[in-house]
Amino acid sequence: MLEVKNLHKSYKTGTTVYPVLKGVSFKVNKGEFVAVMGPSGSGKTTLLNCVSCFIPHDEGEIILKGTDLSGLSESKIAKVRNRYLGFVFQDFMLLDGLTVFENVCVPKVIKEEPYEEMENKARKLLRLFDIEAIQDKFPAEISGGQKQRTAVARALMNDPLLILADEPTGNLDSKSSEAVIGAFTNAQKQLGATIFMVTHDSFSASYCDRVIVMKDGDIFKELERTSRPRQFHNQLLETLAAMNGGESNDDE
C-alpha cells in the first residue's frame, strides 16, 4: 500500500543545514493501523508532511500503491490527495458554517457526486461513529471528541487508499481520545481502512497494529502488537523509557 524508501529531508538556515529525516524506510500494508511516535524534533511530523506531499523531500521514494509520488507534478499530487488520501488533523478543520452532516459530505460535494449516493454514504458513516444524533448540529455545538469523529467520517467519504492522521487526539481528554481511537479501529475493521497516524499519546498508539518509534530523524525501533492494548501500552512505555535513557515521557 505505502512504501517509504531511504527518505531524507533537511532544512537550511543561512549556511547551516539541519537534517530532519536521515534515510527513513518502512511499509504500511493495506488494512493496517500504524502509528509513529517520538520526541519533539524526532522527525515524525516532517515524515507525515512528506508522505502527504505537503512538503518536498530531498532524497528517497514515497510509493503509494505502486506509484512513486516523488516525481509527480503539483497538479497530479493534488489529484492524489483528493482521490487517494484522507486527512484528520489535530484541530479538526471543520467548516463552522456547515452542520456535522454537511461537513461529512464535503469531499463528495467537491467531486460533484449525486446527492443520493452522498447522503447514503454520509449516514452510514454517521451511524458507524455514533454521531448520527448530532448530524444537524454545528461544530460550535458539539464536543471535541464529536468534532474529531466527524473529521474521521469526512476523511472516509471518498474511500481513500490511506488515511493520514496528525495528532488526532492531541486536543482531547482521555474519554474523547478513546472514542476517536474507537472510530479509527471501527473504520479499520468494518471498512478495511488503512491508517497512518502520528501521535505523542502512547494510549492511542497501543491500539495500533504496529508502532514506529523515531529518534533523531531515524527509526529507533518498530513494535508489532501481539497482545491486548494494555500489555502493548506497557511495552511502548518501556521502549520510550529506553530511548530516553530510562525516563518515560508520554507527552513526546
Image: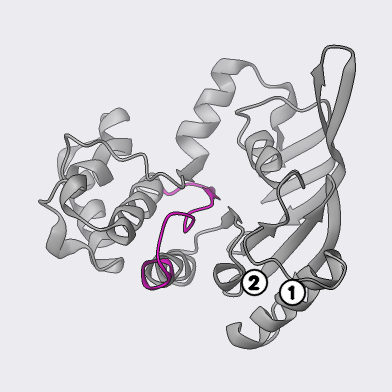
Image side of residue 149 versus residue 6, left or right: left
- Give the residue type at disc 2: Asp
Region in magenta? 159-177
Query: Which of the labelled discs sits on residue 209, or is there none?
Result: 2
Q: Position of residue 146 (x, y in %)?
A: 28, 59
Q: Position of residue 220 (x, y in %)?
A: 86, 59
In front of the other: 235 or 107: 235
In the image, farthest residue toward the top: 14
Image side of residue 143 versus residue 223, left or right: left
Residue at 46%, 47% (x, y): give it.
90
Task: Locate residue 39: give its quadrant.
Answer: bottom right
Residue at 85%, 71% (x, y): give it.
242
Label 1: which residue? 224
Q: Is residue 238 above or below residue 119?
A: below
The secondary element bearing badge 1 is classed as strand
Based on the picture, tell me whether residue 180 belongs to the magenta stretch: no
Q: Is residue 51 above or below residue 153?
A: above
The answer to whether the residue labelled 2 contacts the one labelled 1, judged by CB atoms less than 8 Å apart, is yes
The secondary element bearing badge 2 is classed as loop
- Give the residue type at disc 1: Glu
